Image (spheres, rainbow, N blue to C red):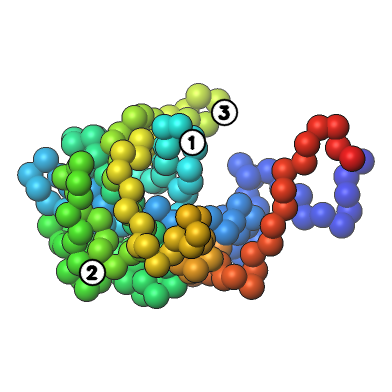
Amino acid sequence: MADPTAHAYEPAQGHGLRHDPFNAIVGPRPIGWISSQSAEGVVNLAPYSFFNAFNYTPPIIGFSTIGWKDSVANIQATGEFGWSLATRPLAEQMNLTCAPAPPQIDEFEVAGLTRAASKLIAPPTVLESPVNFECRLTQLIQLQAADGRALDTWLILGEVVAVRIDRAFIKDGVYDTAAAQPILRAGRMGDYYEITPQTMFEMRRPRWPVE
């Protein structure tokens, strides 16, 4: 029996709202602030809100992009990319790197950011960011719909081969997530959230049998 209090729809038929709720429902989402470099050495920096971690050992992160963009082309060509944590103090700079600039434009320069030389990969990361990952491509996958149609959307997965963490955010041997003030994408046209110590809470994973 249908729930008369629910707004129900089939995405293929349209959502019937002023703005598609999908991005806001699956959120807030961490931001993949991805740096890459073309085979010719041109650097690109761009944020992706379809981003997350997918494996512990080895650590694997991934992001997806709608359309074949500079980041995907660079990573396909070189097999490498960097990730930098987007934080509240860096929110405006991160937003500037959203602009659909031509490939020859240096987003680091546009946003007033400093390139941090990587240890194991060619692309730099964002020096001002408190956490950086250096990644090597593991899979580049073109997504498809349930009916098998190929979509103009690409999923990039990469193994984290090197990590840099600002020591100010390591306390008693534990990384303090909230202290770094990470920001997350919340859907709609320009909504974000910030993680703060006040919103953190702890739950221990239960043992079995549950008491």
* Mark 1–mark 3 distance (CA, rounded to whole Å): 28 Å
Say few, some or many: other residues with alpha carbon within 10 Å of mark 2 (under 14 / 14 to 19 / 20 or more). Answer: some
Nearer the observer: mark 2 or 1; the answer is: 1
Query: Considering only order in the chain, which callout, 3 or 1, is on the residue closer to the N terminus?
Result: 1
Q: Residue 32, percent across and down?
A: 40, 53
Image quarter of the N terminus: top right
Q: Residue at x 20, y 67 (%)?
A: 114
Instruction: Judge from the rendering whether residue 36 lies leftward or rightward of residue 7; answer left or right.
Output: left
* Mark 2–mark 1 distance (CA, rounded to whole Å): 30 Å
Instruction: Judge from the rendering whether residue 74 lies leftward or rightward of residue 83; answer left or right.
Output: left
Instruction: Judge from the rendering whether residue 200 lies leftward or rightward of residue 55; answer left or right.
Output: right
Give the amino acid type for the residue marked by disc 1 in the picture.
Tyr
Q: Which secondary structure lies at badge 1?
A: loop
Query: Considering only order in the chain, which callout, 1 or 2, is on the residue closer to the N terminus?
Result: 1
* Image vertical order of residue 115 relative to residue 61, above or below: below
Nearer the observer: mark 3 or 2; the answer is: 2
Q: What residue occupies the far top of the structure in this picture?
A: 148
Q: Disc number at residue 146?
A: 3
Q: Which residue is mark 2?
A: 113
